[in-house]
Image: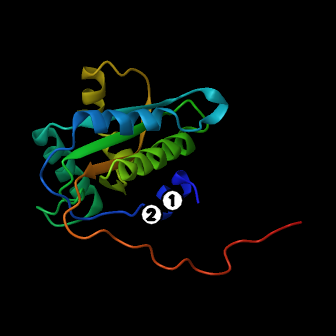
Amino acid sequence: MNSIINAMEGRRSYRKFKEEMPKKEHLEQIIEAGLYAANGMGKQATVTIAITNKEVRDKLAAVNCKIGGWPEGFDPFYGAPAVLIVLGEKSCLTHVYDGSLVIGNMLLAAHSLGLGSIWIHRAKEEFEMDEWKDLLKSLGVEGEWEGIGHCAVGYVEGDKLVAAKRREGRVYWVE
C-alpha cells in the first residue's frame, strides 16, 4: 500500500496533547498541504488563520466551549497548542466543501509529520461574532467569510490510537 493510503488509514483524532508547541516549519507544512486541497472551479476561496498565541487560543477555546454548551474550563481543543482555523468565502457556492477538504489535507499532513490532530466544529458560530470578525479585519482579511472548522494540532500525550474495524455494508458497486 502506498504512503498516502497508509496515512489515511493510520490517522486518528486525538483528544490529549502536550503543551509543547509544534515546530513552526511543521505548522507551515500542514497549512501548505491545506492550500493544495481540491476546490470548486479552482477558486481557492478559503483562508487559514493559524493561532499559536496562547492568550488568543485560550480565548477562542472559551468561546468555543460556551457555544458547545460545555462547563466553563473545559478545553474543546483538548490542550492542543496550535489551532488552524479554516474559513470559506461565503460567495463561493462550494465554500463548505472546499474548506472541509482543506481541513482533511491538514489532518493528514499533521499525521505524516508525527503530530496529532483533531477536527473541531463551531468555527461558523465563532466567526459570526463581531470580535472574531474584527480579528479577520485586523489581519487584512476582507469580505464575507464562514468558519468551516478548526484543525487543532500538537504532540500527542499518550499512546498511538488504532483504528476501529470498519463497518460492513457501506460500499455499493454499479458495474
**Which quadrant does the C terminus fall into?**
bottom right
- For disc 2, the marked residue is 10
Indicate the secondary structure of the residue bearing disc 2: helix
Camera-side residue of 165 and 68: 165
- What residue occupies the far front of the structure in this picture? 1
| Amino acid beneath label 2 | Gly
- For disc 1, the marked residue is 6
Indicate the secondary structure of the residue bearing disc 1: helix
| Amino acid beneath label 1 | Asn
Tell me where residue 14 appears, x and y as whole percent: 30, 63
Q: Quadrant of residue 15?
A: bottom left
Q: Quadrant of residue 106?
A: top left
Q: Quadrant of residue 158?
A: bottom left
Tell me where residue 142 appears, x and y as whole percent: 39, 20
Q: At 37% across and 39% down in the image, what residue appears?
A: 30
Tell me where residue 62 appears, x and y as whole percent: 17, 52
Tell me where residue 89 appears, x and y as whole percent: 49, 31
Q: Residues within 10 Å of mark 1 (few under 14, many from 20)?
A: few
Q: At 50% across and 47% down in the image, what residue appears?
A: 100
